[in-house]
Amino acid sequence: MKAPIGKIMDTDVYTCPVTATLGDVVKLLVEKEVGGLTVVDEERHVTGFISDGDIMRAVSKQKTRSIYGGDSVMVLYDDETFEQKVAEFKQRNVMDLATRKVFCVTENHPIDEVARILSKKKFKKIPIIDQEGKLVGIARRATIMRYIFNMLFDLQLDQITKDPVK
C-alpha cells in the first residue's frame, strides 16, 4: 500500500479568514515568515489561496497596454506610484487577489501522487482537506523532502514530527 500524505502532512497551517483585508494578509505573511496563506471560511473550508507573488503582482509596475477593438484603440497606462498602489489595496478583501480555484488533496492521497502534483503544477505547497472539504493540513515540498530524508536514513513514519493545526 502506498503511504498516504496524511501520515506526513504538516498540521501547522497558517490561514487567513475569507473576510481578511490585504493589509491583514501582508501582516500575517511577514509575521509568520511564510510565502502564502490558505484562505478559509468560518467552517475551515478552503475558499482561496493568497501568496506573496499575488501581492507583488498587484503593486508592481505594469506595462503600457493597447487594446484593439474594431476601429478604435485604447491605451492603458500605469501612472500610479508604488506607494499609491500599496495604500489603495490595504483595505481590499483578500479574495480580490486570491486564487479561487485551489487545488487540494485529501489525507488519503498517496505521497508519490502529491509529489507529482507539486512538481508538475510548480506548486510550493498544497492544502489537504478531509472528506467534508475542511482544511486539516498542508503538504509542502519540504514535507516530502523530509520524508525522503527519513526514508534514506531508515527512520520510521512515526518519528516524523507533526505540528498542531492553528
Image (tube, grey):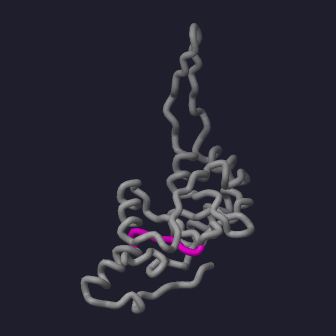
Q: Position of 46 compared to 6: left or right? A: right
Residue at the image position 68 percent from the left and 69 percent from the top = 44
**Quadrant for the C terminus in the image:** bottom right
Residue at the image position 62 percent from the left and 49 percent from the top = 97
- Residue nearest the observer in this picture, 45 or 125: 45
**Quadrant for the N terminus in the image:** bottom left
Coordinates of residue 76 in the picture (x, y in percent): 58, 26
Q: Quadrant of residue 85?
A: top right
Q: Position of 152 compared to 128: left or right? A: left
Residue at the image position 55 percent from the left and 21 percent from the top = 67
The residues colored magenta run: 136-142
Coordinates of residue 155 in the picture (x, y in percent): 32, 90
Q: Tell me if residue 132 is in the magenta stretch.
A: no
- Residue nearest the observer in this picture, 57 or 147: 147
Q: Is residue 38 above or below residue 91?
A: below
Q: Quadrant of residue 120?
A: bottom left
Q: Position of 58 compared to 145: left or right? A: right
Coordinates of residue 152 in the picture (x, y in percent): 25, 83
